[in-house]
Amino acid sequence: MTDAATRGHQEAEDDIGAGPEPTERGVLRWAFLRRRRWIVGAAVFTALHQMCEAAVPVLIGAVVDHAVRGGGVGDLALWIGLLAALFLALTAAMRLGGRWNRQGSQGAAHDLRMVAVARILDPRGFANGARSSGTLLSTATSDTLRIGLGNRAWVIGSGAFAALAFGAVALLLTSVPLGLLVLLGLVPLLAATRLLAKPLSAQGSAEQAQVAKATGTAADLVRGLRILKGIGAESAAQGRYRTASRSALAATVRAARWDAGYRAVTLLLNGLFLAVVTWVGARFTVEGTISIGEFVASVGLAQFLIGPSNRFGGAMSLRARARGSAGRLAALLSEPYAVAGGDRTAPPPPPEELAIDGVKYGPGLRLDLRIESGTALGIVAPDPADAAALLDVLALRTVPDEGRISLGGIPLADLELGAARSALLVADHDADLFDATVTENVAVSGRPERVAAAMAAADADEVVRALPDGADSRIGERGRTLSGGQRQRVALARALAADPPVLVLHEPTTAVDAATEAKIATGLREMRTGRTTVLVTTSPILLQSCDRVVLLADGAVQATGTHRELTCDQPSYHAAVMA
């Protein structure tokens, strides 16, 4: 990993702290604690808003009673003024509560996105292999948003509780029998609402899972779009996405049906409850037990309290959706690491001789090799599996089964991963570019003073001359506005600009013509003078520029010499390189 990447990862860790415990409960707790100030503030303002809402029918009832008793115009104006002040307080509390609520939910979603991205970009990688980009995208976006929105359940629940408590006191002060009727009736109403919400939550979780799967499939297909078109597999890709999309659609329709049924049943129950309260209140008013204003206040409170009781169900639905997403994020965070790294942060002092001693990995790689400091070594691996295994252990993407790799006499395993990858950089053949300018892509290593020289060495300055804004031209996601050869040259310039003591390049010129490749070979040799360079390639032009070439067979060194010597003496080398 480059110094810039290491710093970026460290900044992300500093921003989010240690991160949550990788469990469903741990993720939800962390999301709350990170934004608890905003959530508590939103809960207070929402509770104040709900109590003001509950006070509205009480105050209206008082105005009605005052008017019935023939109160004066001045007193009536005072009551109306109080009602206006109540609405001002209600509005202010609603606005502040909504603003703090968004900070508590959207802010938590941002924090969780940083957690997810930090794990995805963690230099230690994934022991079980990289997850699909679509799955990672869905977890880092949709799931983190749902977990953040789960914080709203605390705010909604607090407001609903405050409204019910205030309304209960107001009802009991107005009429004890009518107040008890409303409060006792709310208990089974809330129980029924909670019972009906359980299958709705289950259907919602199933919907999220299917939508996440469809999103992941779409992202994977978009990522491999060029390959799919190249092999004529568009119809197969469409079929794959169609299946995933239909499953998501079916899950969404099922969830929508449950939601519609839930809303219809709860609306019916609330209507019946309000009808009973209205009928009893009217009887009490006719009998003179309560005044007309108290009847208006009681019915208004009963109607109002239906809303907070329903919001409890909404809060539970939010929490259920958040739990499902928290489980998926926790699964990502609990993925074991591929490598651990050591605790030594200083890179080895020069000379940086690279020694591969008794390294065994997988079924094929069995390697002993020493690469002198400041030399250019070519490695030819006719079996691509041998090349892939070698690159994986050199890049510290995996741990060899046996043996060790040391740099300047210091085992790479003893170095902190950032220090190890700064000292030994592996530039893969399929390295991606970013949606930025050419200059920004090349300078991402944190060595801007080397950008111009690296561009010239990789012949990338010819690329920028063909672009409308030169080096300041944006090249799109994964460099899609460039040709294959142009992307390779920009990626090579990025690796050269990093200027590591040891640079390992895997087939850096497969998409360029022979003349360009010869220019790159010369530039590469000049720029890497005094530095160790390893070229894992079958390009005769690049191999000819190397000081020494090693031929691998069955994962081990079969022969070593110059490109000319091996071409003459080793038929397998000649077949691999000159074919």
Image (cartoon, rainbow, N blue to C red):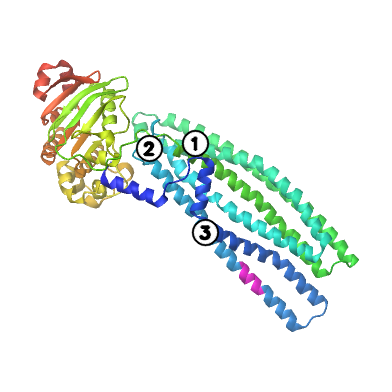
Judging depth in this view, the residue of 482 and 275 nearest the camera is 275
* The label number, if any, that marks residue 38 in the structure image: 3
Residue 459 found in image quarter: top left
Mark 2 secondary-structure assignment: helix
Would residue 305 be visible to someone looking at this image?
yes
- Amino acid at circle 1: Lys
Q: Residue furthest right?
A: 287
* Dot 1 alpha-carbon crowd within 10 angstroms: few under 14, some 14 to 19, many 20 or more: many
Mark 3 / mark 2, whichever is N-terminal: 3
Whole-percent x, y for residue 299 in the image: 78, 62
Q: Residue at x 73, y 45 (%)?
A: 192
Please tell me whether residue 436 belongs to the stretch shown in magenta: no
- Per the model, the C-alpha gap separating discs 1 and 3 is 33 Å
Q: Residue at x 50, y 57 (%)?
A: 103
Mark 2 / mark 1, whichever is N-terminal: 1
Where the N terminus falls, by quadrant? top left
Q: Magenta residues, as a range?
A: 84-90
